[in-house]
Amino acid sequence: VLGLLVWTLVAGTEYFLYPAFGWVMFVAVFYWVLTVFFLIIYMTMTYTRIPQVPWTTVGLCFNGSAFILYLIAAIVDASSVTKELDSHNYNSWAASSFFAFVVTSCYAGNTYFSFISWRSRTLQ
């Protein structure tokens, strides 16, 4: 939900005029789609039907890459928000920056728990 909020706040503006916001949109939409995809896989328990895939490793790689790229996107988003660019988009961009950092912290927590799960799986 928070990732959806990030990209809708940016998409509601003239973000395409500023390349930095294009990067934020790419990261937000890409990881939102992948998160929904993995959510469907886990809710339908499809992962139990495909035991060849190391799901703990996949989850760790996904959450780790999401954390790193969302952190970069959040920093780019925050550093690109200025009143001089376009004043009527300022509030949306500032809110998207805030929520990008919130999503980053969520992915950081997920990365930590994925690492714990992966580590306990590899020690067995």
Image (cartoon, rainbow, N blue to C red):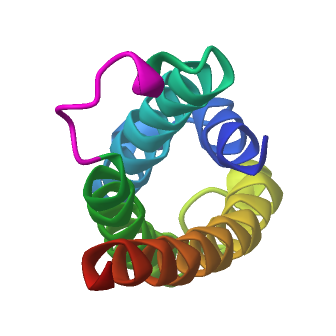
Looking at the image, which is closer to me, 39 or 124? 124
- Quadrant location, the C terminus: bottom left
Tag count: 0
Residue 120 versus residue 15 in the image, above or below: below
Residue 40 location (% of width, % of height):
59, 19
Residue 56 location (% of width, % of height):
36, 57
Quadrant of residue 20 within the rendered picture: bottom left
* Dominant secondary structure (helix, strand or loop) of the stretch shown in magenta: loop
Residue 103 versus residue 1 in the image, above or below: below
- Quadrant location, the N terminus: top right
Identify which residue is drawn at 73% across, 73% down.
102
Looking at the image, which is closer to me, 6 or 84? 6
Looking at the image, which is closer to me, 111 or 92? 111
Q: Is residue 82 visible?
A: no
Looking at the image, which residue sits at the far front?
124
Quadrant of residue 30 within the rendered picture: top left
Q: Is residue 50 left or right of residue 27?
A: left
Identify which residue is drawn at 62% across, 14% down.
44
Residue 66 location (% of width, % of height):
39, 61
Q: Is residue 58 visible?
A: yes
Q: Is residue 8 left or right of residue 47?
A: right
Residue 103 in magenta? no
Residue 50 in magenta? yes
Identify which residue is drawn at 74% across, 65% down.
99
Identify which residue is drawn at 55% across, 80% down.
108
Query: Magenta region: which residues?
Result: 47-54
